[in-house]
Amino acid sequence: VQLQASGGGLVQTGGSLRLSCAVSGNISTPNVMGWYRQPPGKQRELVVRILSGGSPTYGDSVEGRFTFSKDNAKRTMFLEMNSLKTEDTAVYYCAAHDLKSQNIYWGKGTLVTVSS
């Protein structure tokens, strides 16, 4: 299983950005898919996660501004980020947790920088 995140870049405060994560390989159901981020000098934190067949759970700091979606046919998940703040600056990682095998797969991360 491989996850490839893309779409990061430099954006101004208040702007928007859309991240993509292409998933290759087989992940069993049930699973948990999601996005995490690691701000500079801080620990990795939850952005959003979703149990297969369920609704997304967002981190408090992004609730109402970020939206998770996925295209099952293209095996791609997305993170739409709006009203970006400087504190959203981080390396963003997509992840997939196969609940049958308990394997957790991480993408390499994509850097998002929000400038004021």
Image (tube, rainbow, N blue to C red):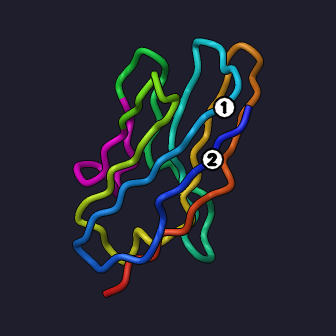
* Viewport quadrant of the N terminus: top right
Badge 2 or badge 1: first in the primary sequence = 2
- Residue drawn at 33 percent across, 50 percent down: 80
Q: Which mark is residue 56?
A: none
Judge by depth and name the residue closer to the eye, 112 or 87. Answer: 112
Rendered location of residue 33, percent (x, y) = 53, 32
Rendered location of residue 62, percent (x, y) = 33, 54
Rendered location of residue 98, percent (x, y) = 67, 22
- Residue drawn at 71 percent across, 38 percent down: 2
Rendered location of residue 102, percent (x, y) = 75, 23
Q: Callout 2: helix, strand or loop?
A: strand
In the rendered structure, which amino acid carries the disc numbered 2?
Answer: Gln
Asked if the residue at tag 1 contacts the one at tag 2, i.e. Cβ–Cβ closer than 8 Å, the answer is yes
* Main SS class of the magenta portion in the image: loop
Q: Is residue 72 left or right of residue 14?
A: right
Most extreme residue toward the front is 74
Q: Choose top left, top right, bottom left or bottom right for residue 72.
A: top left
Residue beneath disc 1: 24
- Residue drawn at 47 percent across, 59 percent down: 7
Judge by depth and name the residue closer to the eye, 4 or 97. Answer: 4
Residue beneath disc 2: 4
Q: Is residue 25 left or right of residue 54?
A: right
Q: Is residue 66 magenta?
A: yes
* Viewport quadrant of the C terminus: bottom left
Please state the extent of the stretch shown in magenta in the rendering: 56-68
Q: Callout 1: helix, strand or loop?
A: strand
Q: Is residue 56 left or right of residue 1?
A: left
**Is residue 38 positioned above or below 86 on the image?**
above
- Residue drawn at 42 percent across, 15 percent down: 53
In the rendered structure, which amino acid carries the disc numbered 1?
Answer: Ser
- Marks 2 and 1 sit apart, C-alpha to C-alpha, by 8 Å
**Is residue 67 positioned above or below 9 on the image?**
above
